Image (tube, helix red, strand yellow):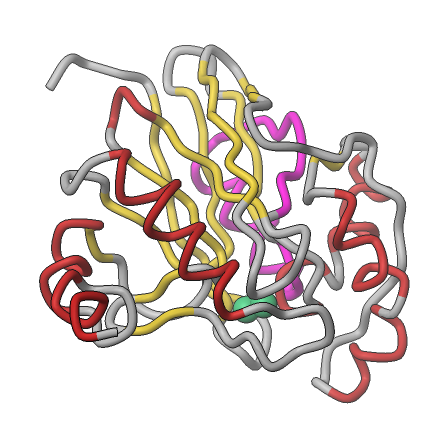
């Protein structure tokens, strides 16, 4: 693999152990936090330990465990927020109703930039591709770094499972379509960080995932 300057550290936050990722460019030591849902003290300590200068906040979707404290962090550190897709506007609007129910202190915010399929986001010398993958929420996006074969998929796909679709505006078929038509074509060798739980690869999930594995889909 060619030497590429992307590094990532996973920092689980909130009572849901949501996988916030600190991602950075080793050439410039500039980076971003993907889904800083809560535990901002822990996140700021992680950023300081890595020696990273934050450029922005990236969001996969509008659920409280992923973005409940993104607005607070953005205001405190004067950072732009990029993502999710605007179809998650209603989730962000209800953060202050949802947060207390989940034990997360939350604040509503307006992203600096809504994202759509085919966009790119950048920090330092790193450029990530944006894929709109609705189903878990209508405005869910996934971030992909082709050169290192790495993706941040939020609550679209997990090791051995897929995202819930029983929320308002959730859609099971949209989720299956997004995974099989947008993620699988990227290649079996893509390693992904899910929103919760351990990392896996697309190839491993195609072999064994009971919801979107090749065998499961052949039976459907
Ligand atoms: Zn979610
Ligand atoms: Zn989640």
Say how many tags the image has: 0
Residue 198 position, x and y percent, is: 28, 65
- 46 in magenta: yes
* Whether residue 119 is situated above or below residue 83 in the rendered picture: above
Front residue (pair 110, 10): 110
At 27% from the left and 65% from the top, the residue drawn is 212
The quarter of the displayed image where residue 199 is located? bottom left
Asked whether, in this view, residue 128 is left or right of residue 220, the answer is right
Rendering quadrant holding ligand 1: bottom right
Front residue (pair 46, 33): 33
- Quadrant in the picture for the N terminus: top left
Residue 19 position, x and y percent, is: 46, 61
* Whether residue 124 is situated above or below residue 105 in the rendered picture: above
At 67% from the left and 57% from the top, the residue drawn is 138
Asked whether, in this view, residue 121 is left or right of residue 189, the answer is right
At 34% from the left and 43% from the top, the residue drawn is 183
**Residues shaded magenta:** 36-59
* Whether residue 1 is situated above or below residue 145 in the rendered picture: above
Residue 83 position, x and y percent, is: 69, 40
């Amino acid at each position: 693999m060619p030497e590429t300057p992307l590094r990532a550290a996973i920092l689980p936050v909130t009572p849901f152990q949501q996988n916030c990722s600190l991602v950075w460019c080793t050439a410039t030591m500039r980076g971003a936090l993907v889904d800083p849902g809560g535990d901002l003290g822990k996140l700021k300590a992680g950023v300081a330990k890595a020696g990273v200068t934050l450029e922005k906040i990236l969001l996969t979707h509008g659920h409280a465990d992923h973005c409940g404290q993104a607005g607070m962090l953005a205001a405190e550190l004067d950072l732009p927020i990029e993502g999710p897709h605007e179809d998650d506007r209603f989730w962000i609007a209800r953060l202050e109703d949802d947060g207390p129910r989940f034990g997360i202190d939350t604040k509503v915010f307006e992203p600096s930039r809504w994202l759509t399929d085919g966009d790119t986001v950048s920090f330092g010398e790193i450029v990530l591709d944006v894929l709109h993958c609705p189903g878990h929420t209508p405005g869910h996006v996934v971030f992909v770094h082709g050169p290192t074969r790495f993706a941040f998929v939020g609550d679209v796909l997990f090791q051995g499972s897929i995202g819930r679709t029983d929320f308002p505006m959730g859609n099971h078929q949209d989720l299956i379509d997004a995974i099989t038509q947008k993620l699988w074509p990227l290649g079996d060798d893509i390693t992904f960080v899910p929103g919760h739980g351990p990392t896996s690869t697309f190839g491993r999930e195609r072999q064994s995932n009971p919801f979107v594995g090749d065998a499961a889909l052949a039976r459907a």
